[in-house]
Image: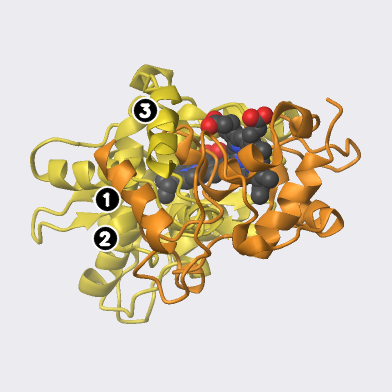
Chain colours: A yellow, B orange
Amino acid sequence: MAKTGIALILALSVVVVPAGSALSEIKSGSEFLSPELRRQQADETRNPAFFWVEQGRELFSRRPAPDAQACIACHVDPQQKLRGAATRYPQVDAATGKLLNLEGRIEQCRVERQKQPAFGYESPELLSMTAYLASLSRGLPMQVKTDGAANPFFEAGRAFFERRQGQLNLSCQQCHDGLVGQKLRGDTISHGAGTGYPAYRLEWNDVGSLHRRLRACSLGVRATQFDYGSAEYLALELYLAGRAKGLPVETPGLRR
Amino acid sequence: MLSRLALAGAVLASGGASTASALEPYAIVGDAISAPLGRLIGNAARGAALVKDRERGNCLICHQGADPSEPFQGNIGPPLAGVGARLDAGQIRLRLVDASLVNPQTVMPPYFRTENLHDVALPFRGKPALSAQEIEDVVSYLATLQTP
């Protein structure tokens, strides 16, 4: 009796294969915000995240110790020379073969070139520095490399994105592809582009990294929250960035 | 398909063989689980609270409930108003226990399943999202929602 019941259900079930939206259709998270929040994001005097950008600018030109060089000593004229840098992260570090996001590159410079202790993920200093450097690419299209050495990371990120996970058994794709534009409580689900991070979230009352946002989505489906800077989230970040190719960098974003 | 059959078979046999706390077994007839889980009796008032409770059912994250005054309701699943007229208690029970048995692609989470899940956060591992009693409470409540 039970077996036939299952067979019946299987026969009745309709297999709906999600249409997998084309990459060109991916929109930024800010397109799903209220017009008021969007205006606030664009307004340097009303988007609180610009405090972090300012602090980053300041840190960038300050010596971290009397005997150490400031970032600006190597990167003169950052407005010109580092404009566009953020559009190419995450990227594979040629020397180590490791995948580095912008945070990872900043920490590498800090430890190896400035000989200072790492700031640490989610520290105000690293958030400021990341927000500042990303803001130098505002408006420029994302253009990460997803082939060659980056490809295995990209594919690992894709697999993560597509896999159902957590006690609630949902994949990133089910929400950020299949349910885009629909309401999850008070939120309108976006494509999960990540091009505004680090961003100021009203819910946090603070600026946070993309990995902090990813941890929130993992928690939402009651899945393992991976560490800040973990291999899992780095690969996922590369996949999101590759998926968002062509979308302008918006950092510092403002989000609900 | 085959793996789903195997999974459903395991549930029927033991309610999730390899987990520490075995789930109450159930039998699927047609598209329903007609018998209450563990022969428990549901309480509709507790069910109503569970549906809203953001820590437990949190159903309104995806569904519009029967109370329009509740702020911020989702619109991913069908509205719950009238669900008791569209489906009988056994059909509702199956959809709560594991909606993927009806639609393998479903977005609706399985509320009474511990098998075949990936990367479940430690505090939730090996446990169903709702207990058998909670499922019965929610079934009792939804069955009362007769008017669309």
- Residue B75 got which mark? none
Of all residues shown, which one is farthest toward the right? B69
1 and 2 marks on the same chain: yes
Left or right? Give the position of A8 relative to A51.
Answer: left
Q: Would you place residue B89 above or below residue A182 in this image? A: below
| Chain of the residue that carries numbered disc 2 in the rendered image | A
Numbered disc 2: secondary structure: helix
Q: Which residue is mark 2?
A: A231
From the top left corner, tell me how far across and down residue A252 is, in percent: 54, 45
Q: Residues within 10 Å of mark 2 (few under 14, many from 20)?
A: some
| Chain of the residue that carries numbered disc 3 in the rendered image | A
At x 35% / y 56%, what residue is drawn?
B10
At x 58% / y 57%, what residue is drawn?
A207
The quadrant of the rendering that contains the N terminus of chain B is top left
From the top left corner, tell me how far across and down residue A43 is, in percent: 67, 36
Q: CA distance from mark 1 to mark 2?
A: 6 Å
1 and 3 marks on the same chain: yes
Q: Which residue is mark 1?
A: A235
> What's under tag 3, amino acid-wise?
Pro
> What's under tag 1, amino acid-wise?
Ala
**Res B95 quadrant in image:** top right
Which comes before the other along the chain, label 2 or label 3? 3
**Res A84 quadrant in image:** top left
Q: Would you place residue A54 above or below residue A246 in this image? A: below
Q: Which residue is mark 3?
A: A141
